[in-house]
């Protein structure tokens, strides 16, 4: 896991200040750093290294090919680099290190963009090609299939710049109103957009070419979810061996490192299965890490301990003391583009605990999308079964009436979520600001400036939803293309890199993703109100018999209680840096409503994170 930064000038040599920008990514790569500058000074690449594979100086980046034509900067891991190395060696390629970076660079030299189909890993990388008489100089860039590793860029008339984090790009502090609208609705800014004008994100499973002679940038997808081809009559017992084998092999690949490796164990089903697979493939006891919230109803550390005892892991627990948002003070300097997910706080804490013992940790992200784990799924299917006969116009009217109530009123979100019918609750029932609340929160001129794009966030989710073929397929594809890459994986990347910890996600092995989306029928994801049916079959074999596998538990905090403990003055103080387009009178109303007992915790935390991002921006 590392940090990337780069600059290309399309005309004459330009000042770039890359050393200053690279220093902002030191937390991502504390072990080494390096800069490359092309002979003409137009291309500059920077890299901050967290050493995981081949700790020697031979893994230093930027790394040049033997002939000097290509130079790479790479963030991530190629888990199957040994297999690719053998293939390349059989074709006459020579290697001087054990680094997966060298393998990736050689793979691009041999196969070009087609190398991406061969990679099993998480990555964001850029390769500078000096070109020759028949090929102009260019940059090639790519991001992994699920979007585990970040890639921000700005493309201007006279330059192109990229970085692993927004803070390492020089950019305007001007808010992109479309992106802000998405953030307030979703709690994150989806791929392609960025909160600040002039900056974009390379979407997951995309690559790009930048022609250095013309400045033209072309971006294209190289992978997408496979079509749903599951046989409705397929049985769990027949599917289980392949799923178990894929999870076990994925974990085996992700435990390869030249540094200590552990597992983040919340006690939920995904992380427990990852820990079980790690114990099965490891020749020595696995180290596991969890968070405890003494006195809170959300404290489920005992479930994690039950799993750890069953597997015989070396278990470590971090007990959080007095509930306080003061935890944000440590994380604050690392927030640039905000996410509203309050679980970033316990994630940041448990990652810090893990870093005391290991440099790499495995997590359970992706299991909900693959196996039907979200509570949305059984709720929506049940409601569709019960209320599917109701004319759509009735839901629209009820949702419109409910939306007029103050934010946080009990039942408001539930009714408002039915605007598109029972199956679209995940789209219209956002925990943050729906269209009605956004209209109140934004000043009139800002809302009107969206010019018909006010429902853009919901339409984005609908576009993902409509790509599916069955009810479950639609819902899981929506989450896989939205909240997974742009919330959960961003949270993991930012909070882990704050501690220079590399987190790997075995459930996001593309072989497992493709199998689950193409071959696992809906009935083995959710049936009769029971989610994760196929996973729970596996749990019967791998986990304690008395473990409650129907729970939905990750690292979480009682955010509503924590915010009420702050009081009105402290909460409003945290809002001081909010953009001018937000009406602070409405914010104060949300605060007072929350202190009076309404459920506005998620909304207030979203605004706090937005204010923090604005405070950290240095144009």
Image (cartoon, grey):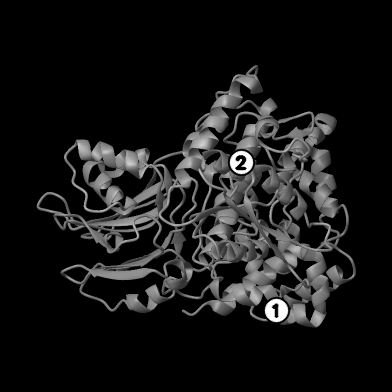
Can you tell which quarter of the image residue 154 is in?
bottom left
**Relative to residue 209, is residue 573 depicted above or below?**
below
Q: Which residue is mark 2?
A: 276
Q: How packed is label 1: few (under 14 Cα within 10 Å), some, or many (20 or more)?
A: some
**Relative to residue 579, is residue 115 depicted above or below?**
above
Q: Where does the N terminus fall, quadrant-wise?
A: bottom left
Q: Is residue 338 left or right of residue 376?
A: left
Q: CA distance from mark 2 to mark 1?
A: 42 Å
On the question of residue 454 being in view, the answer is yes
In the current view of this chain or complex, which residue is farthest to the left? Answer: 133
Q: Nearer the viewer, residue 448 or 332?
A: 332
Q: Residue at x 63, y 41 (%)?
A: 273
Circle 2 sits in a helix, a strand or a loop, which is it?
A: helix
Q: Residue at x 58, y 59 (%)?
A: 491
In x, y percent, where is residue 518?
A: 54, 28
On the question of residue 152 being in view, the answer is no
Q: Which residue is mark 1?
A: 574
Can you tell which quarter of the image residue 269 is in?
top right
Q: How packed is label 2: few (under 14 Cα within 10 Å), some, or many (20 or more)?
A: many
Q: Nearer the viewer, residue 28 or 438?
A: 28
**Dot placed on the residue nearer the N-terminal end, 2 or 1:** 2
In x, y percent, where is residue 469?
A: 60, 29
**Relative to residue 300, is residue 573 depicted above or below?**
below
In the current view of this chain or complex, which residue is farthest to the top? Answer: 233
Q: Residue at x 56, y 38 (%)?
A: 280
Q: Is residue 45 left or right of residue 129?
A: right
Circle 1 sits in a helix, a strand or a loop, which is it?
A: helix
In x, y percent, where is residue 92?
A: 16, 40
């Amino acid at each position: 896991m590392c940090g990337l930064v780069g600059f290309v000038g399309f005309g004459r040599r330009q000042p770039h200040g890359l050393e200053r920008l690279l220093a902002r990514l030191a937390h991502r790569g504390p072990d080494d750093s390096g800069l490359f500058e092309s002979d003409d000074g137009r291309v500059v690449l920077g890299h901050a290294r967290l050493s995981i594979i081949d700790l020697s100086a031979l893994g230093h980046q930027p790394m040049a090919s033997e002939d000097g034509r290509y130079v790479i900067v790479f963030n991530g891991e190629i888990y199957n680099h040994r297999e690719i190395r053998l293939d390349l060696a059989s074709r006459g390629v020579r290697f001087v290190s054990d680094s997966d970076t060298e393998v990736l660079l050689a793979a691009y030299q041999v196969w070009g963009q087609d190398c991406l189909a061969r990679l099993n890993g998480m990555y964001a990388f850029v390769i500078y090609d000096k070109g020759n008489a028949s090929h102009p100089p260019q940059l090639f860039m790519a991001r992994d299939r699920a979007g585990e590793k970040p890639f921000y860029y700005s493309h201007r008339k006279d330059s192109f710049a990229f970085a692993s984090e927004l803070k390492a790009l020089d950019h305007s502090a001007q808010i992109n109103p479309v992106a802000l609208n998405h953030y307030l609705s979703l709690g994150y800014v989806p791929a392609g957009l960025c909160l600040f004008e002039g900056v974009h994100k390379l979407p997951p499973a995309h690559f790009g070419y930048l022609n250095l002679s013309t400045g033209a940038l072309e971006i294209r997808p190289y992978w997408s979810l496979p079509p749903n081809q599951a046989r409705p009559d397929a049985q769990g017992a027949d599917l289980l061996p392949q799923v178990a084998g894929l999870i076990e092999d994925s974990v085996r690949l992700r435990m390869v490192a030249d540094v200590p490796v552990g597992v983040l164990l919340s006690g939920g089903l995904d992380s427990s299965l990852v820990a079980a697979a790690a114990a099965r493939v490891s020749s020595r006891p696995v180290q596991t890490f969890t968070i405890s919230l003494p006195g809170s109803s959300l404290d489920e550390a005992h479930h994690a301990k039950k799993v750890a005892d069953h597997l015989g892991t070396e278990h470590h627990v971090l007990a959080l003391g007095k509930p306080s948002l003061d935890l944000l003070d440590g994380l604050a300097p690392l927030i640039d583009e905000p996410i509203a997910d309050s679980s970033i706080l316990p994630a940041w804490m448990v990652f810090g605990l893990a870093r005391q013992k290991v440099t790499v940790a495995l997590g359970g992200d992706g299991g909900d999308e693959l196996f039907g784990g979200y509570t949305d799924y059984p709720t929506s299917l049940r409601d569709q079964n019960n209320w599917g006969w109701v004319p759509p116009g009735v839901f629209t009217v009820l949702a419109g009436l409910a939306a007029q109530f103050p934010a946080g009123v009990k039942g408001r979100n539930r009714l408002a979520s039915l605007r598109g019918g029972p199956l679209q609750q995940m789209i219209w029932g956002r925990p943050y600001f729906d269209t009605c609340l956004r209209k109140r929160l934004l000043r009139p001129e800002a809302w009107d400036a969206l010019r018909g794009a006010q429902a853009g966030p919901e339409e984005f989710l609908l576009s993902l939803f409509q790509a599916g073929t069955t009810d479950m397929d639609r819902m899981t594809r929506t989450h896989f293309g939205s909240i997974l890459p742009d919330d959960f994986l961003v949270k993991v990347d930012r909070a882990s890199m704050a501690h220079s910890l590399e987190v790997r996600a075995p459930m996001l092995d593309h072989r497992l993703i493709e199998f689950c989306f193409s071959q696992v029928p809906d009935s083995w994801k959710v049936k009769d109100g029971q989610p994760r049916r196929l996973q729970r079959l596996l749990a019967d074999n791998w986990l304690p018999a008395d473990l409650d596998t129907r729970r939905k538990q990750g690292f979480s905090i009682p955010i509503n209680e924590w915010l009420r403990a702050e009081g009105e003055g402290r909460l409003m103080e945290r809002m001081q840096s909010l953009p001018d387009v937000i009406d602070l009178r409405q914010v104060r109303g949300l605060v007072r409503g929350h202190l009076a007992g309404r459920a506005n915790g998620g909304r207030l935390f979203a605004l706090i994170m937005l204010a923090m991002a604005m405070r950290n921006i240095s144009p």
